[in-house]
Amino acid sequence: MPDNETNQTMDGRFWTRTEKKQWMIGLFSGCATLYACRTVMPLCAVPIAKELGWDKTQSGSVLSAFFWGYTMTQFLGGYLSDRIGGDVVLPIAACCWSLVTFWTPQLAYISDDKFLTLRIIIFSRVLLGVFQGVYMPCITSFIGQYVLQNERSSFSAFVVAGTYGGTLLCGSLGSLILETYGWQTVFYFLGVSGLVWMLCMRYILINRHRQKYLPITIIEKKDIPQSSIDSSSTPWVTLFFKSSFWSMIIGHFCENNAFFILLSWLPTYFHENFPDAKGWVFNVIPWVVTIPSSIFGGWLADFMITKGYSVTFVRKFMNTITMLGTAFFLVIISYTSTYLGALVCMALAVACCGFHNSGILVNPQDIAPKHAGSVFGIMNMAGAIPGFIGVYMAGHILEATKSWGAVFNQTAAVSVFGWLVYTMFGTGKQVI
């Protein structure tokens, strides 16, 4: 460990090497739990729609409803984490989203009225999004406060890889439970899993963290003059006039559009086009390859920066792999008629999304290092919009055209647009 890193770690402001490993595993598991609870509805959408009599548009409404709530709490999550601490926000949010997941099957039978049941399920999905929306800004705040700057890309990439691990868990084990015990049991299992993770975090990692770092935080806040606190507020007016800020938001918006459509409609695509295929295969393979691609992308980004490449070049390079790679394989899948070809193209498209975690996703720490949590909250709030617009429109397009090619081609076009904007105006330099 370099001397300066040792000094920074030993003064108590940053996690030690052991603590960093523990939190990497804990937050990775949290991302996995988060996405497992999020993707259980797409996994079970086909049998639920069949049982409750939903068409494609109604299914799209249920799948996209999550992102209405998710959008609401992005900035709030970052603000609360910065003000009162992520150690307070995280366990409360995790408890709530786990309980919503656990009780969802009961809500499906609360009324005999088909449309009332649909509205109740939509509301539960919005509520799930509200509670899950605070998680990513929360861990961004954690990373910004307790991880050394030259380790944040790899740390973030590893932690966010947990989102693919959660999708993998839901797609593999969830598919087996779905086929054996029915869709209701999948919700119960994942809801309980979320509660178990929350209790482990609260009474092991967070408890130790508070004992060590809470006294330090209190002392530091007492030593900071009120004038310094006031001047540290995020200069939003200055930021809103920076093209690099808007290119980051547009790029994140376009990447999330592709990722959320794949996340929400992938199971339905394979069910409809290859009805004899095993769910545990096509719900697993794309996410198996994405975990190493995300971790490798984080390592590659840090490696390129240490070799002298500018941060701007590295972020744009990662974004090129993400956007153009995803767009290419989405176009190819439109012309693929075999199950193996579709599975390979889908896996590679999702794998390209993994490089986003070391590209635009960490860009707020580049352009606004002192305000990364708040800037990330705004960026991710905009990035959640495709979750309800893009996912809903995909269902509407399918209902109107009966063509998966139309969905994939328009998604690819949006990805190319996002790549072009960020390539022209994006930067890795500090803006504010």
Image (cartoon, grey):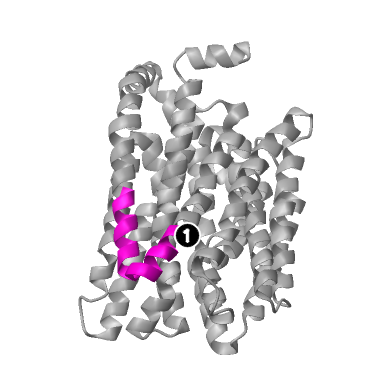
Q: Which residues are magenta?
A: 172-194
- Dot 1: element: helix
> Magenta region, mostly helix, strand or loop?
helix
Residue 64, quarter of the rendered image: bottom left
* Residue 293 image point, x, y percent: 65, 48
Residue 284 left/right relative to 106: right
**Residue kind at label 1, given as amino acid type:** Ser
For disc 1, the neighbor class at 10 Å (few under 14, some 14 to 19, many from 20) is many
State whether residue 281 is above or below residue 369. below
Residue at 52 percent across and 28 percent down: it is 147
Question: Against 184, is 169 above or below?
Answer: above
Q: Position of residue 257 (x, y in %)?
A: 58, 64
Residue 317 is covered by the magenta coloring: no
Residue at left offset 48%, top offset 34%? 24
In which image quadrant can residue 184 be found?
A: bottom left
**Depth check, front residue: 98 or 215:** 98
Residue that badge 1 annotates: 172
Q: Is residue 55 left or right of residue 160?
A: left
